[in-house]
Image: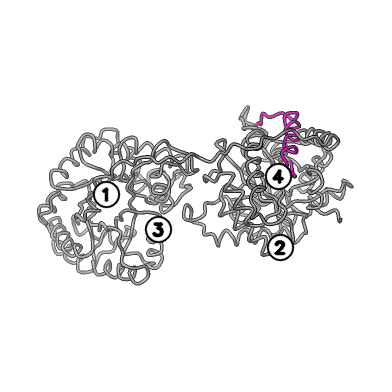
Amino acid sequence: MPDTFLARLAQTPLLCDGATGTLLYAHGAAFEQSFDALNLEQPALVQELHKEYLRAGAEVIETNTFGANRFKLNEHGLENRVAEINAAGVKLARAAVNASGKNAFVAASVGPLGVQLAPVGSVSRQEAHDAFREQIAALISEKPDALIFETFSHLPEITEAIRAAQELAAPIPIIAQMTFTNDGVTQYGYTPVQVAHALAALKVNVIGVNCSVGPARVLSVIEQIIHTVRDDPRRPGMIYFSAQPNAGFPKAQGGRIFYPAAPDYFGDYARRFAEAGVNLIGGCCGTTPQHIHLMRLALDAYARTAKKRPRSATIASNEPETKPLAHEPPTQLRQKLDAGHFVVSVEMSPPRGFNPDQVLAGALILKQAGADVINVADSPRAQMRMSAWAVAHLVQTEIGMESVLHFPVRGRNLLRVHGDLMAAHALRVRNIFACMGDPAATGDYPQATDAYDIVPSGLVKLIKQHFNEGIDHAGTSIGAPCSFTAGVACDPNARDVARELKTLRKKIEAGADFCLTQPVFEPKIAREFLKRYADEFGKLELPMLAGVLPLASSRHAEFLHNEVPGITLTDEIRERMRRAGDNGRAEGLKIASELWSELLEFAQGVYIMPSFGRYDTVAELLEQVKVRA
């Protein structure tokens, strides 16, 4: 039998190397720079690190290409050097193997793209597929012995990577590794059993676990995977298993990052992995040549004795227990929408300071005037203001009026999204308006970050398909189901109507309960928008609250028309406001009342946006149209 990678896996466990990134960091590389670019910038250093692992006893060397895809390289202005960096990575690893004179193998490393896939993020599966295909094509051009996909937590993403590889080079062995949290599921909530079935169905050669926390957790997860695959009569052909844990949980000390798990601890676990049936054993973050050396000694001793420890007949499952949990009743807003009532919603902005009295006084005026719900904007126009959930909570507790919390995703990472949602629900703020939010560059603090991990349609999916089912983004129980009602934005005036229709459809598929529109000054355009939606997707069943913005003066009208994105006034309305002169406010109310009558034809409510904090204007408008809650 030829001494190929798979043939060797079938004999005794192969020892992979440890963390390349850890050694690069130890040699002075900064976290902010591209480690993959060092294949071109410091090739001698990268090759020497490969040699260190070979001298320690590694039989498989991974290329320094984990993050060498177009998305991650784009962060460093290197997106046009994908092919060059990846090809160099394989060449350096192969040169180190050849120089060692050992019968070792080169595994080309492919990691996640570093971006969120739709519908949570903005990158489509096809875009992900293309990015993986570009990287893998460069890697296999230099003929590695295997491809190793590692540190993935999202099954759709690793699926696209594997399919891209199989399209390009079916005969090359594929190692597919996922990473798991301390709770025994991936960040996206996939269990070891689900991962095992999904990867086996893709007909990969090796299924494994890497990164995660430490050896103990990885051993527990890989045992479940082995048990699942070996007991599945449908499994296609021979499947091997791999394990490459981190050296424990990282700690910061003196400005540096350290991993606590000692080399001798890894040596003990190397033997335990082999006894469990793992064929490819190595290390991930924090592991060094010292770890690999003691793992080598342990595996050599295991090969000599060939004694396997007794294994229990059954392996405890980490599948989350799914007990039915009672949902809270729907919000008053949701009940009114479901009953077909016409809903009047009014937008309010939080105060710039910490005194909410003026806002609460305005909310009381609106309640007495007949408004159904208060929409609390979050940092409108990227201006620094009080937290929106504090105001929403105060409106509900002090005024006794239900609120809708505007929840922009811009500037929030996934951890903050989770925390803010749970805080809102704890404060009984259960109507959430998912939106992108205004760019920081347009506001009071242009230097503030705009980074975000999730798009509005993804936020709706998280709310409706996770939190309202009692689980977080990772599938971990949050104790009980939430009872959020989710709203989304819609712009009938959008220049790119086709794109707006497609985006709205995604939000509806994610579970949206209602939509709020930009101000409508020409109902004809809104009707055309709805007709186009109906032609493409069927009649819009989502309740629409159409935007109404009472004009205050001709100057106000011209400002909105010329300087505010998403707002377009007709020439007729602008001329009416010009002729009104000092009576602009009264004319603006008259226009709003006229528009309201037309909106009744297709909208289930209105979303009133009073300018300059003039809530008395809203009260007058409601009196004119004679609408009461």
Sooner in the amino-acid sequence: mark 4 or mark 2:
2
Percent x, y for residue 60?
Answer: 78, 46
> Residue 40 versus residue 464: which sits nearer the camera?
464
C-beta proximity under 8 Å, tags 3 and 2: no
Say left or right for 72 vs 270: left
- Write the start and end of the magenta stretch as one range: 257-281
Q: In front: mark 3 or mark 4? A: 4
Q: Secondary structure at mark 3?
A: helix
Q: Secondary structure at mark 4?
A: strand
- Residue where numbered disc 4 is placed: 242
- Residue where numbered disc 3 is placed: 509
Q: Amino acid at mark 1?
A: Arg
Q: Residue at x 32, y 51 (%)?
A: 487
Percent x, y for residue 173?
Answer: 73, 56
Q: Secondary structure at mark 2?
A: loop
Residue 170 badge: 2
Q: Secondary structure at mark 1?
A: helix
Sooner in the amino-acid sequence: mark 4 or mark 1:
4
Q: How many other residues sit within 10 Å of disc 4, few (<14), some (14-19) or many (≥20)?
A: many
Rendered image quadrant of residue 277: top right
Tell me how far mark 1 sits from mark 2, CA to CA: 52 Å
Percent x, y for residue 264?
Answer: 75, 28
Q: Amino acid at mark 3?
A: Glu
- Residue where numbered disc 1 is placed: 334
Q: Is residue 258 magenta?
A: yes
Tell me how far mark 3 sits from mark 2, CA to CA: 35 Å
Q: Amino acid at mark 2?
A: Ala
Q: Residue at x 18, y 65 (%)?
A: 598
Q: Is residue 324 magenta?
A: no
Rendered image quadrant of residue 515: bottom left
